[in-house]
Image (cartoon, rainbow, N blue to C red):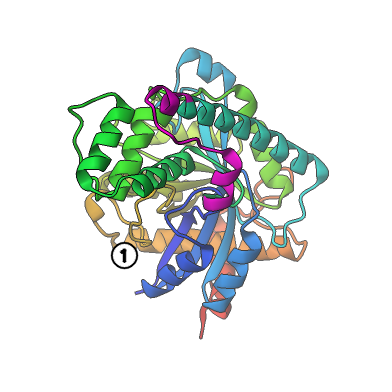
C-alpha cells in the first residue's frame, strides 16, 4: 500500500525530526510516496527537501503555512481554524514554484512577519529568564544559542521548551531531583509526572510557561500576522494554490465557521479558495469522511496531512482520531488531491498556467479535473518509480 502525506513541518519551523533527511527516510519506511513540506512563514527548507525526496524516490509537494488575521472576525469573536484566537485563519500555499523565486515585495513581507514573530520570542525568553531568576535557578536562556542548537530559521515556543528541558536534565541526574526542580519552576510542590517522559515534560513546560495562560506567555501582535488577503496574494505570486487548513477538533468543539460544511464552503468560495487540507489526527472518521466528500463533490482540491509540528513523533501515515485508518475512498481523495497539486506545481515550474492563475482565478473547472489528475499521476509516477 502506498500513502500520501501532503502536510508536515520540518526543522526549519519546528518538527520532531532532527533533520529533513530523517523525515524523508521515515516516509520511505512506511511507503509514503508523496510528501509535502509546510513550514511556517519560510521556504528555506525547500532545497534540502527536494534533494532528499529525489534521493529516496518520493515526490515532493512544496507548501508553506501562514497564520493570518481577519480583523472584523477578531473583534466579533468568530473563530475559523484556531480554537483559542478568534479571527485567526491558518492558510497553506500548495504547489509553490521550485526553485523559489519570490518577488521582492513577497520577500519583504515574509521578513517583516519573521521579525515580528521573533521579537515576541525574545520577550518570552526574557520572561522565562525572570522566572528562573526569581526561583533561584542558575540558568539563563539565550535566543542565539537556542536558534543554533535547535532551530534552523524560526525560533518558537516549542524550541524554548526543548531548550529548558535539556538544561534541567543536564543539571539534575536523578528522577527525584528533576521532579523537585520542575516543581520549583512551576511553583507547585504537588505537581507530579513521569520525568522520564521527555515529550510530556516539554508539553508541560509549554502549558505552564509558554502557551496562552502560561506565566511567560506574550500575546502575538497583529504585525506578526498577514491579513488573509495578503497571504493569498503572496501564495499566488509564489506560484501556489491558496488552501484553507481544516482542523475540525471535535473534542475541543468545532468553531463557528467549521461547524457547517455548507457555511464554510460558501465562505471559502467567496474568498477565492478552491482547496482545503485536513490535519486528520483529531477528527473522527465519520466527520472527516463527511467534510472531505462534501468539498470534493463541490470541486475543491482535498488533501490530508499529519502536521508533525509537536514533539510527538507519530506515524507519517494520515489517520483519523484514535489512529483509525482511512478507507479506500479517503485514500483515493487524498491521492487525487496530491495529483492535482503535482500537476499545478509542474506547470508552474515550466511557466505554464496551472490550476489557478496569478490572480487566483480557477482555470481547471470540475469537468476538466480528471484529465488534470491523470497528468499529475504521471508526473508523480515518473519520480517515484524505482
Depicted 180 relative to depicted 324: above or below: above
Mark yes or no: residue 83 visible. Answer: no
Of residues 265 and 219, the one drawn nearer to the viewer in this rendering: 219
Asked if residue 126 lies left or right of residue 131, the reply is right
Residue underneath mark 1: 328
Q: Quadrant of residue 118?
A: top right
Q: Where residue 20 appears, x then y in whole percent?
A: 52, 63
Of residues 271 and 148, the one drawn nearer to the viewer in this rendering: 148
Q: Where residue 241 appears, x then y in whole percent?
A: 62, 49
Q: Where residue 285 appears, x then y in whole percent?
A: 26, 49
SS category of the residue bearing label 1: helix
Region rendered in magenta: 130-149
| Label 1: how many Cα within 10 Å (few below 14, some 14–19, many 20+) | few
Furthest residue to the bottom?
386
* Residue 363 belongs to the span the image colors magenta: no
Q: Where residue 58 appears, x then y in whole percent?
A: 51, 73
Q: What secondary structure predominates along the stretch shown in magenta? A: helix
Residue appearing at x 48%, y 13% in the figure: 76
Residue appearing at x 31%, y 49% in the figure: 198
Q: Quadrant of the N terminus?
A: bottom left
Furthest residue to the right?
104
* Residue 135 belongs to the span the image colors magenta: yes
Amino acid at each position: 500500500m502506498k500513502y500520501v502525506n501532503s502536510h508536515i513541518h520540518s526543522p526549519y519551523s519546528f518538527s520532531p525530526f532532527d533533520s529533513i533527511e530523517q523525515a524523508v527516510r521515515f516516509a520511505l519506511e512506511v511507503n509514503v510516496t508523496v510528501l509535502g513540506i509546510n513550514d511556517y512563514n519560510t521556504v528555506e527548507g525547500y532545497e534540502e527537501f527536494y534533494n532528499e525526496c529525489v534521493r529516496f524516490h518520493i515526490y515532493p509537494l512544496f507548501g508553506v503555512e501562514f497564520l493570518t488575521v481577519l480583523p472584523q472576525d477578531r473583534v466579533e469573536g468568530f473563530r475559523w481554524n484556531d480554537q483559542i484566537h478568534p479571527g485567526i485563519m491558518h492558510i497553506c500555499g500548495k504547489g509553490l514554484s521550485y526553485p523559489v523565486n519570490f518577488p521582492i515585495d513577497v520577500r519583504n513581507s515574509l521578513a517583516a512577519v519573521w521579525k515580528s514573530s521573533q521579537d515576541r520570542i525574545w520577550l518570552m525568553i526574557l520572561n522565562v529568564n525572570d522566572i528562573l531568576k526569581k526561583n533561584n535557578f542558575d540558568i539563563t536562556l539565550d535566543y542565539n544559542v537556542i536558534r543554533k542548537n535547535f532551530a534552523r530559521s524560526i525560533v518558537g515556543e516549542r524550541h524554548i521548551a526543548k531548550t529548558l528541558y535539556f538544561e534541567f536534565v543536564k543539571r539534575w541526574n536523578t528522577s527525584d531531583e528533576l521532579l523537585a526542580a520542575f516543581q520549583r519552576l512551576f511553583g507547585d510542590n504537588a505537581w507530579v509526572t513521569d520525568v522520564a517522559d521527555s515529550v510530556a515534560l516539554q508539553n508541560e513546560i509549554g502549558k505552564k510557561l509558554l502557551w496562552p495562560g502560561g506565566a511567560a506567555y506574550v500575546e502575538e501582535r497583529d504585525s506578526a500576522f498577514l491579513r488573509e488577503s495578503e497571504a493569498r496574494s503572496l501564495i499566488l505570486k509564489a506560484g501556489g494554490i491558496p488552501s484553507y487548513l481544516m482542523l475540525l477538533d471535535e473534542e475541543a468543539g468545532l468553531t463557528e465557521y467549521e461547524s457547517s460544511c455548507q457555511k464554510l464552503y460558501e465562505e471559502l468560495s467567496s474568498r477565492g479558495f478552491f482547496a482545503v487540507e485536513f490535519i486528520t489526527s483529531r477528527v473522527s472518521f465519520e466527520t472527516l469522511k463527511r467534510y472531505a466528500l462534501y468539498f470534493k463533490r463541490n470541486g475543491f482540491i482535498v488533501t490530508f496531512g499529519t502536521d508533525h509540528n509537536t514533539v510527538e513523533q507519530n506515524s507519517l501515515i494520515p489517520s483519523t482520531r484514535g489512529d483509525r485508518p482511512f478507507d479506500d475512498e479517503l485514500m483515493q481523495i487524498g491521492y487525487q488531491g496530491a495529483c492535482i497539486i503535482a500537476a499545478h506545481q509542474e506547470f508552474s515550474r515550466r511557466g505554464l498556467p496551472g490550476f489557478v492563475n496569478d490572480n487566483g482565478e480557477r482555470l481547471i473547472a470540475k469537468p476538466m479535473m480528471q484529465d488534470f489528475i491523470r497528468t499529475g499521476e504521471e508526473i508523480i509516477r515518473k519520480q517515484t518509480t524505482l
